[in-house]
Amino acid sequence: MTTARAPGKIILFGEHAVVYGQPAIAVPIHQVSAIVEVTSISASRLGVIHVEAPDIGLDSWLHEMDQDQPLARIIHLTLNEIGIHDPPALGITISSSIPIASGLGSGTAVSVAIIRSLSNHLGQSLPLKRQSELAYEVEKIHHGTPSGIDNTVVTYAKPIFYKRGCDPEIISIGAPFTLIISDTGVQSPTAVAVEKVRRGWQDDPNIYESLFDEIGRLVLQARYSMERGQVNKLGPLMDQNQVLLEAIHVNSPPLQALINAAREAGAYGAKLSGAGLGGNMIAIVDPLNAHAVEKALKQAGAVSTLTTEVIE
């Protein structure tokens, strides 16, 4: 048996604007992950692969799956990449503790874990850059026009400064800081929000480009503060980023309720994270006050909360 895992992720600053050439910052969330096990099985011929993903009710043979189904797609891409067209009979079992359609990178983490477990089992592990590139191909199925940030941060599992078309840069964290991730319980497929923003941009490109430019400037300020350990400056930057996300119409009443609750409970700053319209909110907090903020979030309707420390 060969087992591999990949973490969840959260976008700190820059979502949506990153699709239009602005930078963004994302960090891995190691408390949740996708885990993939690959085992050799008995079968009558080569090339027979059984895929099981209990979390989504999948139990199928690879040749019976639509080739554009995301799990089938990443398996085929991985086999093609390592040049194995008649693999031995295999069983692939997929599990994940990452909530689906909540902005934590569930689909990306599954893709990366499949790439790692399958290539390692067949004796041909792939470099991180190529893992990320293969996962990006499946991101297109999940999200339509992905920025590339999800596959990058999940693959490298480090805080990442990302700009489309450029090599990712790992951010050196000057001082750790604490985040609370709070789930509205409203599933929000990324492709829906991305398309909504695209329509707004097409209808009024000057206003949207101006908003994206402002978000990009905030991202640069956030990176500067993170590298210098200026944690106190990150909260106000989150709040400013949230105002700009509201202006491109990806906020929602459930998200706003959680943002308000976090701020009123003493969070340094709070914003939606990821696509918006649902999914997750993040707040930066004093570790000593984390419990009080979590309690306030649950009272405001959060279906779950997760506290994590961002370190290098």
Image (cartoon, rainbow, N blue to C red):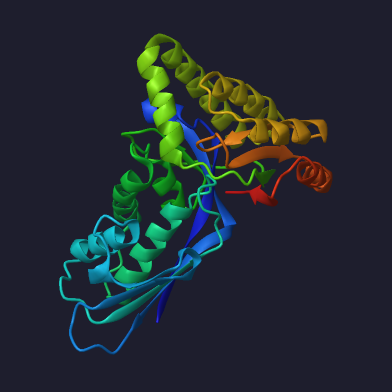
Q: Position of residue 277 (x, y in %)?
A: 55, 34
Q: Toward the viewer: 60 or 307?
A: 60
Q: Quadrant of residue 279?
A: top right
Coordinates of residue 102 in the picture (x, y in percent): 54, 46
Left or right: 207 with respect to 281?
Answer: left
Q: Position of residue 61 (x, y in %)?
A: 29, 74
> Quadrant location of residue 184?
top right
Tell me if residue 21 can be seen. Answer: no
Left of 206 or right of it: where is 140? left
Counting the numbered discs, the total is 0
Query: Dividing the image into 4 quarters, which one contains the N terminus?
Result: bottom left
Residue located 35% across and 33% down the image: 164
- Residue furthest toward the top? 206
Q: Residue 13 or 173: which is nearer the viewer?
A: 13
Residue occupying image coordinates x 30% and y 79%: 90
Q: Is residue 58 above or below residue 44?
A: above
Up the image or down, 16 lies above or below 94; here it is above
Q: Residue at x 75, y 39 (%)?
A: 285
Q: Nearer the viewer, residue 28 or 147?
A: 147
Which residue shows up at 16% across the image and 67% down it?
83
Q: x, y (%) of residue 62? A: 27, 70
Q: On screen, 48 above or below 224?
A: below
Looking at the image, can residue 148 be seen? yes
Residue 168 higher or lower than 116, as above or below: above
